[in-house]
Amino acid sequence: MVLSTAIALAMMVSTAAADPTATRDALERLDEVLTLRVESGLLREEAVMPALLVSAEPRYEASADWFSTRVIQLLDGAFGDGGLRVCPACAVPRVAAEDGVLVYQSGPMGLDEVLRLDAQTRGDAPPARSAIYVEEHTNGVAVRIIDLATGRVLFAQNIDPDLIEYGNTQRTYAMAEELERRARGDSLTQAFVDVAVVPGQHISLDWTDQWGAHNQRMSGVTLSVVDPIVGVGACHYRATRLFNTAVGGKLLMSLPTAVVDAVDPGGGGGGDVVDPLLTGVALVRVPFGRSNYAGVATVSTNGEFALGISLLNVTLLPVLP
């Protein structure tokens, strides 16, 4: 009685987990991911095609009527028509004679068997370059693309409708890569645009190299357009463990004042030209989570205290980092 109840509950859970809509959405995401990989060159069409579709296996009865067809459609769309081959024999038990002995095999097929079946059935067509496996699971679909010549994994990913697992995987790899880079002490270029306008003003651009045993130091050059007006100099910061807050300063030379001093060294009025020759700026920069923005506070030797926003690692469009 207990066993029958457990089996019934397991069947109910399995049935409840079957969601054809989730599978269809996951296949749409897979189509988008494969297309992006091909367009970016990370997954080259010539490395995949011709391809042998070894498995397009639905998990639930609700998906059985359309799953394989949809997989074929999206693979054709991603890699081009005419290069995809379906392998029905790859999913059935095999019997072969080896050294006078009949060998019966079932279950997953090895790459050597896939190559043998492709050679037997392709005729005059070129050999398949890759084997593709697509299976439905409880949260979406799983896909693997394997190079038949070397066994190298060209692409392997679990895809869900919201790409949550895909995103988590990418973040995990990025974190591991960052930790390894920090452990090696490799440098990393950082760019900052500081726009502090309340109550004083300080606007500057920094290009720094991140370095140190734990890459916690940043040193580089800076260009100021306010406080001082048109100034160049050097900057240095240290990243702390408190919210990755950067603390440091800049030493800037006012270009207008430097030019006047160079033209009229004995005039004595160079310090009165817009800004003093040298300006020191103390700075604290606090990132907003994992975004490309941070709060910034500056205090300069010109008596300017300012609060504002810092753009981190900006592109050519500073408002869209």
Image (spheres, rainbow, N blue to C red):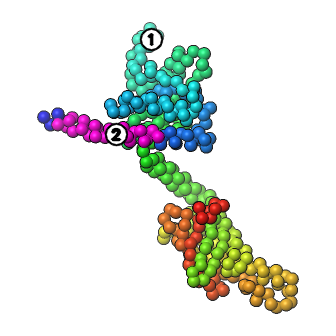
Disc number for residue 304: none
Looking at the image, which residue sits at the far left?
1
Q: Nearer the viewer, residue 304 or 19?
A: 19
Residue 19 lies, in percent from the top left, at 34, 39
Instruction: Say whether residue 36 is magenta.
Output: no
Specify the principal SS of the magenta part. Answer: helix
Q: Which residue shows up at 28% across the image and 37% down it?
A: 15
- What's the residue at 74%, 80% (across, down)? 254
SS at mark 1 in the image: strand
Q: Is residue 147 visible?
A: no
Residue 8 drawn in magenta: yes
Answer above or below: position of 18 versus 299.
above
Relative image position of residue 129 (x, y in whole percent): 58, 27
Task: Name which residue lies at 49% across and 27% down.
Answer: 53
Residue behind mark 2: 19
Identify residue for label 1. Answer: 97
The single residue placed furthest to the bottom in the displayed view is 268
